Structure formats: C-alpha cells, structure tokens
C-alpha cells in the first residue's frame, strides 16, 4: 500500500531547470528596473542647457489635455548620445475623462557629446508642422 505523496517525484534535473529559470528571471527583472533620474525636466525648463554624465538618467515630464487629440512627440532623439528608455502616461488629475494627462519620458545618456531633447505638441493627423507647443533642451554629456 502506497503512502500519500509517493507518486510525486521530482528529479534533480527538474529542480536544476527550475532553479536556473528563477535565476534568469531574476537577472531580467534587474535590468528592467529604472534608476532614479539625475534630473527631471518640466515645461518651465524649456530652452535650458543641462550637463549630465555618461549613463545618467534624465526624465521629461509634460502635461497634455486628454481627449483633444494633442500629444507630445519626441523628435528624433540622437541615438548615439541618448536612449529613450521608456514612455509612460498617468492621469494628472482626479481621473476625470478628458482631464490632464502627465507624459513621462525617460532617457539614458550614452556617449559624451552635445545633443538635444526636442518634443512637439500636436495632433498626429495634422503633423508636426501644426505643433502648438514645443519643448527643447540642449544636453551636454561628459
């Protein structure tokens, strides 16, 4: 007569494979975590010049009005000097439909040099030529 649980058998290979899977999963989640930004840029920083070190994180936070069709779009970041790591949105108010929306763009600096973060606020069907607002920051990377 078999005791309860005797039919359950886990080989060493299965345990090793499971452990290896957990290890790989742990490594992948560490890379996905974002560092704290060295600098957060907002609308009032438009036109400024900033200096950062290689590998630092800079975040741009701009507000748009939901439901109007307008949104902020990054204009060709210089891939040699800046990497767009993430783009997120969240309600900037009490969650009312059509209320303000906060856009958060996270960039990582790469090679030393001078570049720009350029963003335009427009409706996609009208095109960038009809942008009603612009955001521009000169970035020096040391």
Image (tube, grey):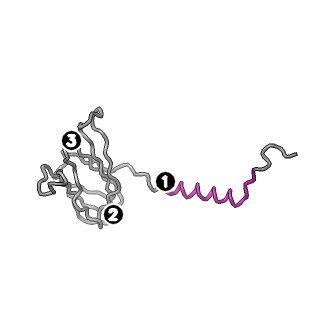
Report the magenta stretch's main SS. helix
Q: Position of residue 53 (x, y in %)?
A: 32, 59
Residues at marks 1 and 3, CA–CA distance in whole angstroms: 33 Å
Given residues 40 and 90, the one toward you in this image is 90
Within 10 Å of disc 3 (Cα), the crowding (few <14, some 14-19, many 20+) is: some
Q: Give the quadrant of residue 89.
A: top left
* Among numbered discs 1 and 3, the one appearing first in the sequence: 1
Q: Quadrant of the C terminus?
A: bottom left
Q: Which mark is residue 65?
A: 3
| Whether label 1 touches label 3, CB < 8 Å | no
- Residue 12 drawn in magenta: yes
Residue 135 seen by the camera: no
Q: Position of residue 86 (x, y in %)?
A: 34, 53
Residue under label 1: 29
In the displayed structure, 64 sits above or below 119; it is above
Q: Give the quadrant of residue 127.
A: bottom left
Give the extent of the magenta segment: 8-29
Q: Nearer the viewer, mark 2 or mark 3?
A: 3
Residues at marks 1 and 2, CA–CA distance in whole angstroms: 21 Å
Image side of residue 62 versus residue 54, left or right: left
* Among numbered discs 2 and 3, the one appearing first in the sequence: 3
* Among numbered discs 1 and 2, the one appearing first in the sequence: 1
Q: What count of labels does the image hold? A: 3
Q: Nearer the viewer, mark 1 or mark 3?
A: 3
Within 10 Å of disc 2 (Cα), the crowding (few <14, some 14-19, many 20+) is: some
Given residues 22 and 122, the one toward you in this image is 122
- Residue 25 drawn in magenta: yes
């Amino acid at each position: 007569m078999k005791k309860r649980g005797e039919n359950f058998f886990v080989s060493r290979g299965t345990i090793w494979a499971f452990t290896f899977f957990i290890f790989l999963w742990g490594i992948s989640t560490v890379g996905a975590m974002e560092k704290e930004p060295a600098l957060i840029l907002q609308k009032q920083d438009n036109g400024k010049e900033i200096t950062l070190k290689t590998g630092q994180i800079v975040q741009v936070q701009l507000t748009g009005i939901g439901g109007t069709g307008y949104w902020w779009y990054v204009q060709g970041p210089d891939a040699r000097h800046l990497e767009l790591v993430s783009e997120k949105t969240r309600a900037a108010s009490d969650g009312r439909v059509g209320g303000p929306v906060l856009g958060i763009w996270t960039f990582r600096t790469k090679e030393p040099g001078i570049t720009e973060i350029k963003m335009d606020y427009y409706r996609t069907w009208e095109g960038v030529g009809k942008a009603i607002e612009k955001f521009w920051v000169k970035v020096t990377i040391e």
